[in-house]
Image: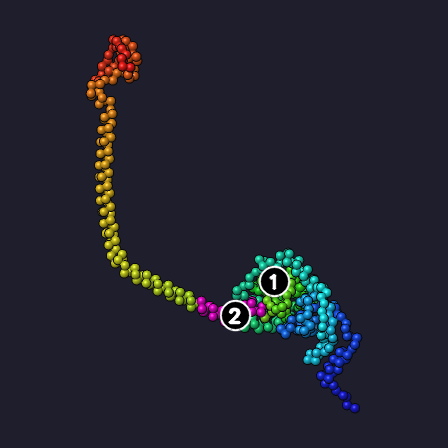
Amino acid sequence: MAPQYLTVTALTYALKRLIEENVSLDGIWIKGEISNFTAHSSGHLYFTLKDENARLSCVMFRNQARLLKFRPENGQAVSVTGRMSVYEKSGNYQLYVDQMESDGLGDLYQAFERLKRQLEQEGLFDSRRKRPLPPLPQKIGLITSPTGAAVQDMIKILRRRRPNLDILIFPALVQGEEAPASLIKALGEAAKFQHLDLVIIGRGGGSIEELWAFNDEQLARTIAHFPKPIISAVGHETDFTIADFVADLRAPTPSAAAELAVPDQESLTRTLNGLTQRLYQSVRRTIQSKRQDLRKLTQSRVLLDPYFQVNRKRQDLDWLTERLTRWGIQTVQMKRERFYRLLGKLDALSPLATLERGYAIAQTEDGRFLNHSDQVEVGAMIQVRLAKGLLHCKVLSKEADTNE
């Protein structure tokens, strides 16, 4: 007897009815931690509910999602209720969530936040300690899984943008319990290559559990103290890990990291050609300007007749010399006239002029001037100075001035 066959659709439909008609699943509440959360543009919410041993795919449609009083996030602990079913297109069973309540933060999210706060307080996230990327790297190291799609994407982009670039691959595990130690070991190997200009560390997208290796504390410290600039490229654009915060630069994806690491050679060539053209035009304009200046100089009166300016200066010198001479003569005359005026005043005040008019000056023998008869005694010898000559006299008598 020939076996009977079911189509995939028939089997999936049978399983779907089996799950949907299981009354023991009606109205139950399920607790777990959110991961792989996506808020679709349609308003529907897609996420995974997980605990330490299992995962459950969940969908919350827009009509139910708009009634939420909080915004779900990865790592958040929640309680949900709804109906179980199978999505035929993917063959996955999933929970269609009708209600969701927040139970706080999940264990992984809390551990992430604790480590993030600790390293931030230590200054490992400080932008001042982060190094700029080299403008034209010659050797780049890739620390990632050698078999993943991420490494192939990065190599393809790097080769396209810089065909002569040296690429060194340091293979490492990128998920699982042994991944942090494997990544640290790969960083140690890369540090031995002194001529490496730059390192990219990362992997493609995945769940929060698959990316958790990049939240390891020891890995973060190794990245922070790595001797060369590091780009962290873990997961998708919405994924953030501790490695992203301590690296010198965070790229949203591995492909974006490859584009950030090296400039596009064609673009660089166009830029270089543009700069060369600008430099040529600048030099050309400078030469033309200097030629015009030289032409003006060669046609100037100074160079055509250099003695013209010399003779003009000589004429100026003659004019200044004449002015100085006239000023000197006038000044001497003014000083001479003033001198004679002062000399006349001095002569009028001179005691010699008084003597010329018949007056005399009486002095004691020791030279004291006499202006009163009480200054000498009868019989004393005095000197009388005339306009011409000197008399030695003896006081025979004296009398006081009757008008005194």
Q: Where is the N terminus found, in terms of image quarters?
A: bottom right
Left or right of residue 32: residue 269:
left
Nearer to the camera, 98 or 391 = 98
Question: Is 353 contained in the magenta span?
Answer: no
Residue 239 rendering spot, x and y as whole percentages: 64, 67
Examine the rendering and report whether any part of residue 346 can be seen. Answer: yes
| Image quadrant assignment for residue 254 | bottom right
Question: Is 262 contained in the magenta span?
Answer: yes
Left or right of residue 30: residue 225:
left
Mark carried by residue 247: 1
Label 1: which secondary element: loop
In the rendered structure, which amino acid carries the disc numbered 2?
Asp
Examine the rendering and report whether any part of residue 32 can be seen. Answer: no
Query: What residue appears at the point 74 percent right and 86 percent down from the top-left corner?
Result: 6
Residue 133 rendering spot, x and y as whole percentages: 55, 63
Q: Which residues are magenta?
A: 256-275
- Tell me which numbered mark, 1 or 2, is placed earlier along the sequence: 1
